[in-house]
């Protein structure tokens, strides 16, 4: 009895100490995580609302710093399907047994092809574009006289037509344009220096991007494995497979848009060049390059690229400008109804309104590249929102067709 009496105070003391210890609780931990996330989101929203310019400048600085890596990832995305196709070709048709050798040869051939295209552009296309721009600037006084003569002839042929408003706008625009060109000419030496610095920086970034793309393509299996390990580490076990499926579909959307839109824009640019030469339009190469590059932006890209070409041709010949406008309309219809769906399928399933919003935001952050990448990013965000809505409706047992 004495032993029991002496042991009971000790055991009760241990129980009291155990009660004082911190015991983990999953419910409280989840609530704490949610609270921290809400506080962080509120702080971020307040920061964006109070200092929008500082936030946008910070985002631009980060994007500018990461631009070589973004371009490198973009190059790897574009070349990866070509390299995979060449590996299968070398392995199956050329009977090369070693996959490693096939991969090395495929990468060498793919990069040689890309560098060959860039060298061709530098040696043949860029000088012609520069020549076209120089010729356009030299002929600007003649184009100005032709524009004034065009309005005078228009008033003679159609006396009842009031073109004074348009003529006054042209009279105000052309002198300011000439003054701007003269100002550029007077500052030509500083402009050359600035352009040289920008060109060296761009070439350095391009070199870094190529090196990054090579390492990404070499280590793509290792990078994919590390990413899967990260998913298995962070995502709950019951959601791992569905997370991998969603990420795989997002990758398919992004890759289909990047590769498909690149091929689509190249074809549209070549077709524009061919038809402009057939119709004997001036500055065919310069205008076709602009049309092909801006065609990377869905729906509105061809019309955005047509504006400078239309203005140039309007000063040369209004008839050719009208023919060019019809040509762009036909190319846009051909691209939207036949070529685009054939190459890309339904990789960008978002409405034009959201495309405008994404292009505006992407352009303000990353310039032309941001405008291009914002469209597949918006498509991925739309896909994720759609999955979330379907999940919530299914959980609440609501049929979306009845709403």
Image (cartoon, helix red, strand yellow):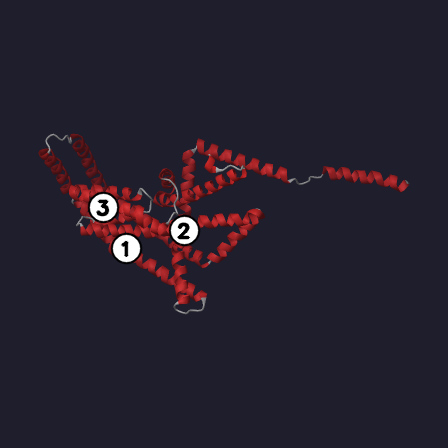
Residue 324 percent location from the top left of the image: 21, 45
User: Viewer-proximal residue, 399 or 228?
Assistant: 399
Q: Is residue 84 left or right of residue 40?
A: left
Q: Residue 24 carries which label?
A: none
The residue singled out by tag 3 in the image is: 327
Q: Residue 155 occupies which quadrant of the picture?
A: top left
Q: Is residue 399 above or below residue 240?
A: above
Residue 167 x %, y %: 16, 33
Q: How crowded is mark 1: few (under 14 residues within 10 Å), some or many (20 or more)?
A: few
Q: Residue beneath label 2, please?
A: 255
Labels 1, 2: front one? 2
Residue carrying label 1? 121
| Pointer 1 or 2: first along the chain | 1
Task: For label 3, count other residues whose C-alpha is less than 10 Å away and answer few (under 14), some (14-19) or many (20+).
Answer: some
> Mark 3 against mark 1, which lies toward the viewer?
3
Residue in the picture at 45% in, 34% down:
48
What is the CA distance from the residue labelled 2 to the residue labelled 3? 30 Å
Q: Position of residue 207 (x, y in %)?
A: 37, 54
Determine the residue positioned at 54% across, 39% down: 395
Q: Residue furthest front?
A: 402
Question: Mark 3 and mark 1: span between their CA atoms?
Answer: 25 Å
Q: What element carries label 3?
A: helix
- Outermost residue on the right side: it is 1
Kindly give the residue lying farthest to the left in the view shown: 156
Q: Pinpoint residue 248: horizontal percent, then vertical percent.
A: 47, 50
Return the disc, 3 or 1, that comes first in the chain's sequence. Answer: 1
Residue closer to the observer: 284 or 300: 300
Q: Is residue 353 left or right of residue 145?
A: right
């Amino acid at each position: 009895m004495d032993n029991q009496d002496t042991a009971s105070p000790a055991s009760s003391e241990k129980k009291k100490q155990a009660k004082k210890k911190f015991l983990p609780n999953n419910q409280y931990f989840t609530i704490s995580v949610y609270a921290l996330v809400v506080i962080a989101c509120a702080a971020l929203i307040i920061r964006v609302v109070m200092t929008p310019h500082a936030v946008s400048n910070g985002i631009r600085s980060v994007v500018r710093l990461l631009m070589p890596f973004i371009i490198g990832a973009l190059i790897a995305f574009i070349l990866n399907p070509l390299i995979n196709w060449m590996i299968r070709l070398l392995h199956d048709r050329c009977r090369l047994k070693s996959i490693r050798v096939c991969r090395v040869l495929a990468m060498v051939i793919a990069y040689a092809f890309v560098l060959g295209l860039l060298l061709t552009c530098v040696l043949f296309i860029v000088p012609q574009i520069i020549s076209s721009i120089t010729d356009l600037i030299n002929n600007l006084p003649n184009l100005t006289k032709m524009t004034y003569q065009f309005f005078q002839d228009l008033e003679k042929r159609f006396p009842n037509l009031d073109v004074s408003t348009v003529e006054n706008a042209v009279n105000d625009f052309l002198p300011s344009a000439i003054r701007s060109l003269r100002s550029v000419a007077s500052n030509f030496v500083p402009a050359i220096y600035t352009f040289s610095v920008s060109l060296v920086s761009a070439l350095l970034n391009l070199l870094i991007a190529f090196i990054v793309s090579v390492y990404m393509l070499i280590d793509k299996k290792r990078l994919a494995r590390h990413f899967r390990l990260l998913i298995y580490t962070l995502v709950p076990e019951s959601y791992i497979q569905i997370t991998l499926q969603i990420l795989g579909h997002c990758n398919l959307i992004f890759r289909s848009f990047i590769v498909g839109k690149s091929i689509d824009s190249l074809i549209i640019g070549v077709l524009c060049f061919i038809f402009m030469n057939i119709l004997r339009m001036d500055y065919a190469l310069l205008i076709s390059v602009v049309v092909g590059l801006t065609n990377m932006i869905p729906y509105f890209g061809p019309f955005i690229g047509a504006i400078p070409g239309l203005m140039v041709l309007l000063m040369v010949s209004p008839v050719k400008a009208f023919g060019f406008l019809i040509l762009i309309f036909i190319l846009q219809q051909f691209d939207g109804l036949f070529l685009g769906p054939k190459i890309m399928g339904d990789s960008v399933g978002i409405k034009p309104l959201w495309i405008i919003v994404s292009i505006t935001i992407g352009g303000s952050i990353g310039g032309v590249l941001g405008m291009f990448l914002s469209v597949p990013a918006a498509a991925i965000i739309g896909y994720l929102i759609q999955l979330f809505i379907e999940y919530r409706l299914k959980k609440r047992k609501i049929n979306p067709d009845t709403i």
